[in-house]
């Protein structure tokens, strides 16, 4: 890629970080106001929408949703594939009122973003305090069920940066949570976004991301011993749908080098970006936030190792 292409890529990355910080600051203010008027449960929803409308407009990225009516079928545990920083736009477009996310406890100290997450009711989980985390999750699932709300989890546990429509292996935490609370699983699949953003090849295009919200899957009769098989069935369903969606539609602003064909072809799913995307911190403090909910629940449900 030429010098101009790299300049465009870096500019759009800096713009993305700036817009993200601005929206997070708005989220802090919105969370305070909504808490004062008794509407705290709407804080993450309103801020998510700001992420989508502000960042989507300035970055030239749209998100089209198939079956949006399934987002209103609450209570639910939403599970989605996790690719890159562009997931922020997908979340912003689909996040329903009353939904929340999980995050590692250290994120609450990150300026703006952490403050917003703390004020808006994010479920912070501390890997060093398992008992506290279990109580947090138990209370959350009861709240979700009784108030018909939702929680959003990425079962892959980390961003895949995949350059083809596929999934990493699933963690079982979200599915244990659904089984315990008898809350339906709602799978959400997203077209591969490497055509729009690929940090290895310094690509950051405008374009359209397609999201499909699948029908809710009941867990009312799901038994604890069947969670592993259930997890695999959901993964297989999502993988079929992701392959059907294919790649996001890119409006090409930058040209890929001749050796960059894997961006839309057959690169390995295990390949990770060399430089990371525009929201990754140097110390990776935001990476694997879902690992917290995964490890807590799996430790609670998996048989103890033989001694």
Image: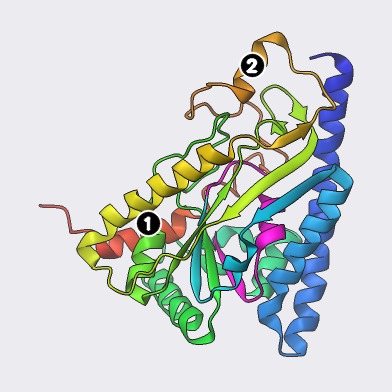
Identified at 61% across, 41% down, the residue is: 191
Identified at 77% across, 63% down, the residue is: 49
Question: Can residue 278 be seen from the camera position used here?
Answer: yes
Q: How many marks?
A: 2
Could you say whether the residue bearing mark 1 is in a helix, strand or loop?
helix
Identified at 52% across, 26% down, the residue is: 271
**Residue 78: % across, % down:** 51, 62
Res 6 quadrant in image:
top right
Identify residue for label 2: 261
Q: Earlier in the sequence, mark 2 or mark 1?
A: 2
Identified at 61% across, 60% down, the residue is: 67
Identify residue for label 1: 295
**Residue 113: % across, % down:** 72, 60
Residue sitting at the far bottom: 37
**For residue 97: magenta?**
yes
Could you say whether the residue bearing mark 2 is in a helix, strand or loop?
helix
Question: Does residue 4 lie above or below 8 as drawn?
Answer: above
Q: Residues within 10 Å of mark 2 (few under 14, many from 20)?
A: few
Q: Residues within 10 Å of mark 1 (few under 14, many from 20)?
A: some
Residues 261 and 28: in front is 261
Of the two numbered discs 2 and 1 in the rendering, the one whose residue sits closer to the viewer: 2
Q: Which residues are magenta?
A: 81-103
Question: Does residue 73 lie above or below 160 as drawn?
Answer: below
Where does the N terminus fall, quadrant-wise? top right
**For residue 117: magenta?**
no
Question: Does residue 250 lie above or below 67 as drawn?
Answer: above
Res 114 quadrant in image:
bottom right
Question: Can residue 170 be seen from the camera position used here?
Answer: no
**Residue 287: % across, % down:** 56, 46
């Amino acid at each position: 890629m030429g010098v101009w292409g790299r300049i465009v890529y870096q500019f759009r990355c800096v713009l993305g970080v700036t817009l993200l910080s601005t929206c997070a600051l708005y989220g802090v203010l919105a969370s305070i106001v909504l808490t004062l008027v008794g509407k705290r449960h709407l804080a993450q929803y309103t801020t998510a929408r700001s992420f989508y409308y502000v960042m989507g407009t300035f970055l030239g990225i749209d998100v089209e949703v198939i079956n949006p009516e399934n987002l209103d079928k609450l209570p639910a545990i939403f599970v989605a594939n996790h690719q890159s920083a562009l997931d922020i736009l997908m979340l912003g477009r689909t996040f329903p009122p009353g939904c929340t996310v999980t995050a590692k406890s250290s994120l609450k100290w990150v300026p703006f973003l952490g403050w917003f997450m703390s004020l808006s009711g994010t479920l912070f989980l501390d890997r060093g305090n398992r008992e506290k985390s279990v109580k947090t999750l138990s209370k959350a699932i009861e709240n979700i069920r009784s108030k018909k709300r939702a929680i959003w989890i990425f079962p892959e546990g980390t961003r895949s940066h995949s350059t083809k429509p596929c999934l990493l292996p699933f963690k079982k935490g979200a599915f244990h949570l659904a089984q315990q609370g008898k809350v339906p699983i709602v799978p959400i699949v997203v077209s591969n976004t490497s055509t729009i953003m690929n940090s290895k090849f310094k690509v950051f295009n405008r374009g359209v991301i397609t999201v499909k919200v699948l029908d809710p899957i009941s867990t009312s009769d799901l038994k604890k011993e069947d969670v592993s098989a259930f997890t695999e069935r959901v993964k297989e369903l999502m993988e079929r749908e992701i392959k059907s969606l294919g790649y996001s539609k890119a409006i090409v602003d930058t040209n890929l080098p001749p050796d960059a064909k894997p961006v839309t072809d057959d690169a390995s799913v295990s390949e990770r970006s060399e430089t990371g995307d525009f929201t990754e911190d140097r110390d990776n403090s935001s990476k694997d936030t879902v690992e917290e909910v995964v490890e807590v629940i799996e430790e609670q449900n998996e048989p103890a190792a033989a001694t």
